[in-house]
Image (cartoon, rainbow, N blue to C red):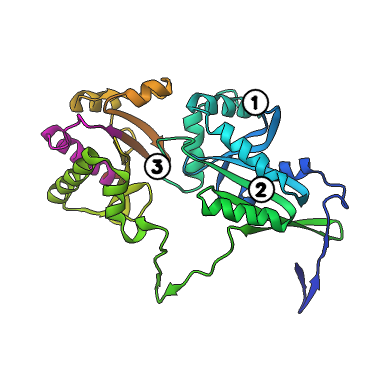
């Protein structure tokens, strides 16, 4: 690391955590307060989280924007081999946590932080909103990830981490350097694994990355990989209805991993989370225009209750909820096999949602 002084560069001296009297607890606090240092948006939901089965604790537990849990292990000295086994143990235990367990953990953490009124879904949606991420995943803890952070990475650990990634275990290893500039301390993180890659660019357009099929084969990805047979038919039928009846709408845009979108004047109006047994339609509408009880009655669907147990939510038939989103409301319609997208009631609902969005977009 270099400091610019006039027209010259002055090297900033690298030091060690222990040399400066810093502990793992200090690094833990820094990451907890700003997890973006790990190179991505993360919602911290636990510190020194107990794992009763092994009588050990996870340094930090987080959730990423896809709803996956993230185990973060921190070492201020050399990262030694056992930390990978330790992290895998934690991930295996966390994989059994259901929605209620995650919610209890998050509630405990945030209430200790002074948040007396706590709602897990609201907290996660607020996190996504702050990160500029719109679609909310419908399934939490579908996968588990590991981030290992420390001063020096041993070759053996790097080899193990690369092998795990090759076998679809999401492991990230970050090496942090510590600098002292006359009593001012600097922390420099560098992602060691996955290995940095140089992405090729075409003129004016980023080249397609082969391991992201939703980018270059988006329609096939959603229809054949994400949707079951019944949902595939519904999505195709829904596309035909929008194309034939809503001429101002552009789309569908298939190039996102978890959702298909439709736009009005280059702004997303509707995005559809695709799943095997359900489609989740998210409409952005003008605040206060759409009432959940009225939609429930007109479309003959249930009203979605966020406070219900997860087991009840999963078994619920087609349902609707309305939640506030900054300058818009979001009408979230979960449609399952019994829902008829060809009904005149549903077409009217589509037009009402678009008219409401136009009102905000044109304001």
Residue situated in front as seen by the camera: 276 or 324: 276
113 is within the stretch colored magenta: no
Q: How far apart are marks 1 and 2 (CA)?
A: 21 Å
User: Is residue 354 in view from this perspective?
Assistant: yes
Residue at image position (41%, 25%) is 306
Residue bearing the label numbered 3: 327
Q: Distance between the residues labelled 3 and 1?
A: 45 Å
Q: Which residue is drawn at 59% across and 27% down?
A: 105
Between disc 3 and disc 1, whose residue precedes?
Answer: 1
- Asked whether 117 or 242 is in front, the reply is 242
In the rendered view, does 183 fall on the left or right side of 202?
right
Query: Disc 1 marks which residue?
Result: 53
Tell me the number on the disc at residue 148.
Answer: 2
**Marks 3 and 2, Cα distance to the nearest angstrom?**
38 Å
Q: Looking at the rendering, which quadrant does residue 42 occupy?
A: top right
Front position among marks 1 and 2: 1
The location of residue 221, given as percent across then percent down, is 31, 52
**First to last magenta residue range:** 333-358
Residue 195: which numbered mark, if any? none
Of the image marks 1 and 2, the number of the one nearer the N terminus: 1
């Amino acid at each position: 690391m270099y400091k610019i002084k006039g027209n010259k560069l002055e090297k900033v001296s690298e030091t060690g955590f222990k040399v400066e009297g810093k502990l793992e607890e200090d690094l833990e606090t820094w990451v907890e307060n700003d997890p973006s240092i790990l190179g991505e948006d993360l919602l911290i939901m636990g510190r020194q989280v107990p794992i009763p089965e092994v009588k050990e604790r996870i340094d930090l537990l987080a959730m990423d924007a896809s709803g996956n849990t993230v185990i973060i292990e921190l070492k201020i000295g050399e990262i030694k081999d056992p930390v990978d086994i330790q992290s895998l143990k934690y991930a295996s235990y966390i994989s059994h946590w259901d929605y209620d367990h995650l919610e209890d953990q998050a509630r405990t953490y945030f209430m200790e932080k002074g948040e007396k009124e706590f709602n897990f879904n609201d907290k996660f949606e607020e996190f996504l909103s702050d990160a500029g991420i719109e679609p909310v995943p419908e399934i939490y803890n579908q996968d588990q990830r590991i981030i290992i952070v420390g001063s020096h990475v041993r070759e053996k650990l790097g080899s193990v981490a690369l092998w795990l990634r090759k076998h679809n275990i999401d492991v990230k290893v970050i090496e942090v350097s510590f600098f002292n500039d006359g009593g001012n301390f600097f922390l420099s993180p560098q992602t060691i694994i996955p290995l940095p890659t140089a992405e090729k660019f075409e003129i004016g357009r980023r080249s397609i990355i082969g391991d992201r099929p939703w980018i270059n084969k988006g329609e096939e990805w959603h229809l054949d990989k994400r949707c079951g047979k019944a949902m595939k038919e519904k999505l195709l039928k829904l596309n035909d209805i929008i194309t034939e009846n809503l001429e101002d709408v552009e789309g569908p845009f298939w190039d996102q991993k978890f959702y298909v979108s439709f736009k009005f004047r280059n702004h997303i109006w509707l995005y559809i989370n695709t799943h095997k047994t359900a489609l989740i339609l998210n409409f952005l509408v003008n605040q206060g225009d759409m009432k959940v009880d009225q939609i429930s009655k007109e479309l003959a669907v249930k009203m979605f209750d966020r406070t219900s147990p997860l087991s009840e939510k999963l078994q619920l038939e087609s349902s609707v909820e309305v939640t506030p989103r900054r300058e818009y409301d979001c009408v979230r319609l979960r449609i399952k096999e019994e829902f008829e997208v060809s009904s005149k009631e549903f077409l009217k609902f589509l037009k009402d949602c678009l008219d409401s969005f136009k009102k905000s977009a044109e304001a």
